[in-house]
Amino acid sequence: MKKAILLIVLLIGIPGAIAGWYFTRSANGKTTYSTEEITIGNIRNFISASGSLAAITTVEVGSQLSGNIEKLYADFNDEVKAGQLVAQLEDSTYKAQLLQAKANLESARATELGIEAQSKNLKASLLTAKAEIQVSRANIRKAEVAVEDAERNYRRNKELFERKLIAESDKDSAQTALESQKASLEAVKAQHESAKAKEMAIMAQFESLDADRSGAQARVRQMEAQLSVSQINLDRTSIYSPIDGVVISRAVDEGQTVAASLQAPKLFVIAQDLKKMQIDTAVDEADIGVVKAGQKVTFTVDAYRNRTFNGVVEQVRLSPQETSNVVTYSVMVTVDNNDLALKPGMTANAEIVTGDREGVLRLPGKALYFKAPDELARHSKELRAEKGQLATDTLPVWILNKSGKPQYKTAKIGISNQDYIEILDSELKEGDLAIVGVQGVVSNGSSAANTSRRRATIRL
């Protein structure tokens, strides 16, 4: 607790009756003092604030789809459980979209399977083409050997013919055989080139088929995504409560059309638990310094004027709110509402307890307003001069001693309210009579007064 700072403003020279404290001197100069007893008791200091009651957690339940409300399964004040169906949109359109998405997926998968079948056929054709290339390559080698043999045979027969050792027909026969072998070689080479061309054609078909396969696979994934979206949309036609709670607002009726464009249309507002509520109070910046989490709060509502409710400061929010140049801070107060007497939206008039003392020595607040007459004032100055300057948390106090005379005392103070000031350390004790005023009656029966007032403000 910070040390109290006592600010005393003296307002002097107002004749007449002021604030109920008077002193008058009688003809013989005798003075009568008004006193109040210094007691042991309780002191409570508080800050007044107001705010609205609300559920600690509220959830707006909306529709992510556009459509007609086919059926409502919850109404005002209904208790609902998490996962409970609260509304149903007309779903025929979304069912049709789901069927179409399934058909599109089946078609895409069939196309993919057809491409895989083509791929298998091409693989077989490619193996055949490669085998043909191997055979034609072997045939070329055989044909080349045959041509070489035919060339040697022709050269030998030609030489023998020139030496007149064989007939011309034998030479011609060898020449014909050579030409035949060369023709066979060219034919085999042509077969080889044909097999290679066939292989290249099949490879080109493979490349094209790979592109088709990638496209078919992409379309299958696309159709799977469409099916998933269609299923999600169909599921979203059934609207469920996300939490356990109570329906405090219903914004639609059966048959009404809702349109989900930039944001989901609100169907219900569900409060999670009305047995625990909160008050969002606004506290002035001048008072916020003494407000802390955990402080007790009492409050009333207009619906129950003779009942006081209790709460606790849960949070002091740092963000300021400014209205008409007045700065306030939001203080969140949690409230038990086990009997459900409190309703959302009620206005709460709260008192935040910033100081609470039980069984302490307390000085009547009126003692602050007592101004000693001139002769006592001179005496108090002399005493203060002897004791030195008073600390800012120390008050001068006049008491009436046992002989009925004023006596100057000092008291170190703690918290205060409009009625009492806590005495922490002083020359005072329980039962002392603190002087709060001076009064008397003149001898001729007429009243006369010489009054003054002192106003004190104590900041904690």
Image (spheres, rainbow, N blue to C red):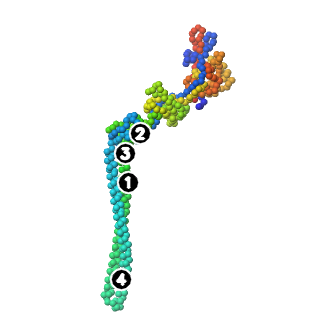
Would residue 256 be seen by someone viewing this image from the given angle?
Answer: no
Would residue 387 be seen by someone viewing this image from the given angle?
Answer: yes
Q: Mark 1 points at which residue?
A: 221
Depth check, mark 2 against mark 1: the one in front is: 2
Q: Mark 4 points at which residue?
A: 150
Secondary structure type for disc 1:
helix
Residue 356: name its quadrant.
top right
Depth check, mark 1 against mark 4: the one in front is: 1
Q: Mark 3 points at which residue?
A: 235
Image marks 4 and 2: residues in contact by CB distance under 8 Å = no
Q: Name the residue under label 2.
A: 81
Name the amino acid, label 4.
Answer: Ala
C-alpha gap between disc 1 and disc 3: 21 Å
* Comes first in the chain, label 3 or label 2: 2
Residue 186 horizontal side relative to residue 273, left or right: left
Q: Dot 2 surroundings within 10 Å: few (below 14), some, or many (20 or more)? A: some
Depth check, mark 1 against mark 3: the one in front is: 3
C-alpha gap between disc 3 and disc 2: 19 Å
Secondary structure type for disc 4:
helix
Q: Which of 74 and 453 is in front in this view?
A: 74
| Residue 450 x/y as whole percent | 59, 15
Query: Could you tell me which residue is drawn at 44 percent across and 37 percent down?
Result: 272
Query: Could you tell me which residue is drawn at 37 percent across and 56 percent down?
Result: 217
Q: Which of 63 and 370 is in front in this view?
A: 63
Image marks 1 and 3: residues in contact by CB distance under 8 Å = no
Depth check, mark 4 against mark 3: the one in front is: 3
Image marks 1 and 4: residues in contact by CB distance under 8 Å = no
* Comes first in the chain, label 1 or label 4: 4
Residue 397: name its quadrant.
top right
Depth check, mark 3 against mark 2: the one in front is: 2
Name the amino acid, label 1.
Answer: Arg
C-alpha gap between disc 4 and disc 3: 85 Å
